[in-house]
Image (tube, rainbow, N blue to C red):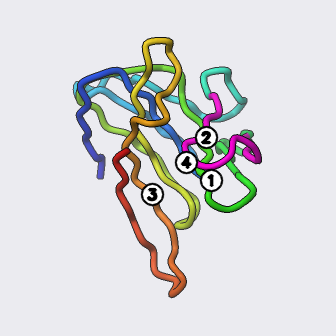
Amino acid sequence: MKNKFSYSTGILVLILMRVLLPLSSVNAENGTILIEDSFDTLSGDWQPVYLEGSSSGGSYSVSSGQLNVSVTGPDKIYAVYNTTPFTGHFYAEVEFTNDDHCGLALIRKQSNGQPDTNNFTSIRVSTNGSGKVVVAVRDR
């Protein structure tokens, strides 16, 4: 099932926390492809950002057609964002290879082109102490 989202100003798609992620595509509602990456090689379109915690300990790479994102230390949210901004109605197709410490966020682009780490909405997936998968939405 494809999820549709709407946002009225320039945004970036972020992949959060520790995750192996094949990104199929981000498409406009009319089907136009806005972002697509097979992750055969690491392109300069992906840049790191810290959304929470200290600005150290994160890394990302690509292998076997997946984007690998990891962070060391507690209480940090490290992400990789695509530098291609877009607006309007869209849907994103992503696949997570696990149900813990992963997510997707929409983040506002500042006038200088950098992500505004104080203005984002995220959907985060984690596993609680009982082994249940928990999905949380955060609007900052």
Which residue occupies the foreground of this view, 17 or 37?
Answer: 17
Main SS, magenta residues: strand
| 4 or 3: tag closer to the N-terminus | 4
Dots 2, 1 in contact, CB < 8 A: yes
The residue wearing badge 2 is 50
- Residue drawn at (35%, 29%), measured in percent from left and top? 27
Dots 3, 1 in contact, CB < 8 A: no
Check disc 1 and report its element: helix, strand or loop: loop
The boundaries of the magenta stretch are 47-60
The answer to whether 66 appears left or right of 29 in the picture is: right
Q: Position of residue 17 (x, y in %)?
A: 60, 52
In the picture shown, does residue 103 fall above or below 27? Answer: below
**Residue 100 lies in what quarter of the image?**
bottom right
Q: Position of residue 94 (x, y in %)?
A: 46, 46
Check disc 4 and report its element: helix, strand or loop: strand
- Residue drawn at (69%, 33%), measured in percent from left and top? 40
